[in-house]
Image (tube, rainbow, N blue to C red):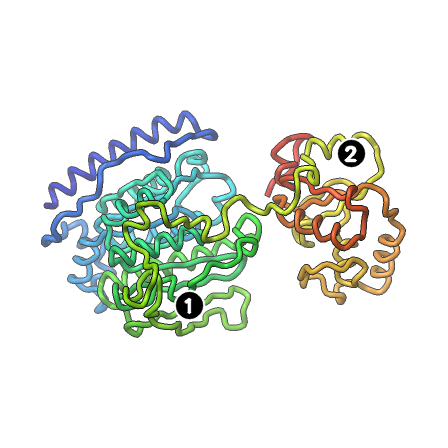
Amino acid sequence: METSLKAENEALKKRISELEAQLANRIGHASVSSRQSYPPPNVGEKSEVGLSLEEYKRYGRQMILPEIGIEGQMSLKRSRVLIVGAGGLGCPAAAYLAGAGVGALGIIDHDTVENSNLHRQIIHSTSRVGLPKVVSAITYLRDLNPHPNYIPHIEPLTTENALQIMAEYDLVLDCTDHPAIRYLINDVAVIMNIPIVSASALKTDGQLVVLNNPPGVGPCYRCIWPRPPPAESVIGCGEGGILGPVVGLMGVMQAIEAVKIITMNPVREVGRAEMTLFAAYGASPFRCLKMRGRKAGCVACGSPERVEEKITRESIESGRMDYVAFCGGSAGVRVLQPDERVSVAEYKRVMDSGVEHLLLDVRDRTQFGICQLAGSLSKFFHYALYTGLIRLDIPYTEFEASKYGDSEAGEIESKFQDQPKDRPVYVICRLGNDSQIVTRQLKEAGVFPNDRVFDIEGGITAWARSGVAGEFPEY
């Protein structure tokens, strides 16, 4: 059995090396098929496995723990773990599980490594920018520990492939950042009787929860969150920001929970879920909340006689389950008509023409301090929002009145009141989402003539990437 594993692993190493060689020539513009095929993991009978002398030495520091022992180490070597997402959560989780000696470690991700990933996605590197994250991750992991069988899935997880891929594993780590994928992972895991270790992180906060554990007993994701959050409220790291060690900590905690499940040391109360909350800047950084148990009427894991439209293998495979639609679509914010928006190139022509206009930057104070377009107004605009000079239903709580002195407040108010209301107004944010909302609300508030208020598509990011004004920082 061990000889067979080694042979498969060597074949996989050769395939990955070939991929690296092919893709190294295309760094910066790597294009990877979303439906590549790779050898499946070795998922035969769970026969007894042994440890080599090198493995005894490698894993010795954890094997002497009563919680692990030789039986726990054998369980790790027999385990098959799937990590969905090789980003900020998946990177540390994969590193520690590979280091712990899991038998088979599958990684699924269709994205490529970018410079903006590297401050938090610790197993990627500058030399591998442009490569698929799966290739980059396995390159690192194979160097860390050559013993596990690494299985690459360079493709997105979809309703077409989720059942087939997840059937090859007995534990899944949800390291994604989109609700639609979380619900898909949950539903397939329930059908396959697979526990889920789920985590998320944003800004300086994180959360962790173990679901469907034990399978058929513990609550699933839908038991706790039967409905997704409003699409407009879902903020990714690109918009909200993320502190690297925060997402790294949550990924490490996922690895800990995975090891506990594999070695059958769950600790947590059977049949219930506990959510661990982390706040890096909180007075007490860690909190643990007891969540509800399994719901009899849950459409994923509930009793069939209590559920009208229970989610099944057939409903997923047939495409009846539209997870993107269920979570509010993926097209981004669309609240304006095309004639209410201008491209960055069109706005550049406005700047160059010398036509007097207002440019309102609705990013927060921190982002505005990083970079801004010439002549843009930010601080005055947010003060106007706060004081009611402009009345919009936007919770800019970071701009309390206490942040402005009396003289500064008077200067800002005067500046606003002196602005002619008939000149064109252009609204910009970072990605072109918040600016659409503000543009719409400005029109509805009647602050400026409706036909003279425009959103700048793509925001500061599009401005930087387009190069319309030469070099400009992108963050």
Which quadrant would residue 392 be assigned to in this image?
bottom right
Q: Is residue 341 left or right of residue 267?
A: right
Relative depth, front residue between 425 and 170 = 425
Relative depth, front residue between 199 and 426 = 426
Residue 106 placement (x, y as % from top left) = 29, 46
| Residue drawn at x 11%, y 51% as measured from the top left | 45
Q: Is residue 278 left or right of residue 239?
A: left
**Which residue type does callout 2 highlight?**
Met
Relative depth, front residue between 337 and 276 = 337
Mark 1: few/some/many CA within 10 Å (<14, 14-19, 20+): some
| Residue drawn at x 41%, y 59% as measured from the top left | 199
The residue under label 2 is: 351
Q: Judge whether residue 246 can be spotted in this image.
A: no
Q: Which is in the foreground here, disc 2 or disc 1?
A: 2
Instruction: Report the number of discs.
Output: 2
**Which residue type does callout 1 highlight?**
Thr
Residue 369 placement (x, y as % from top left) = 69, 49
Residue 358 placement (x, y as % from top left) = 80, 44
Q: Is residue 36 above or below residue 77?
A: above
Q: Judge whether residue 185 can be spotted in this image.
A: yes
Residue 5 disc label:
none
Q: CA distance from mark 2 to mark 1?
A: 50 Å
Query: Considering the image in quadrants, where does the N terminus appear?
Result: top left
| Residue drawn at x 81%, y 46% as measured from the top left | 449
Q: Is residue 427 left or right of residue 155?
A: right
The residue under label 1 is: 276
> Upstream in the sequence, badge 2 or badge 1?
1
| Residue drawn at x 37%, y 54% as measured from the top left | 174
Which quadrant would residue 268 be assigned to in this image?
bottom left
Asked which secondary structure carries label 1, the reply is strand
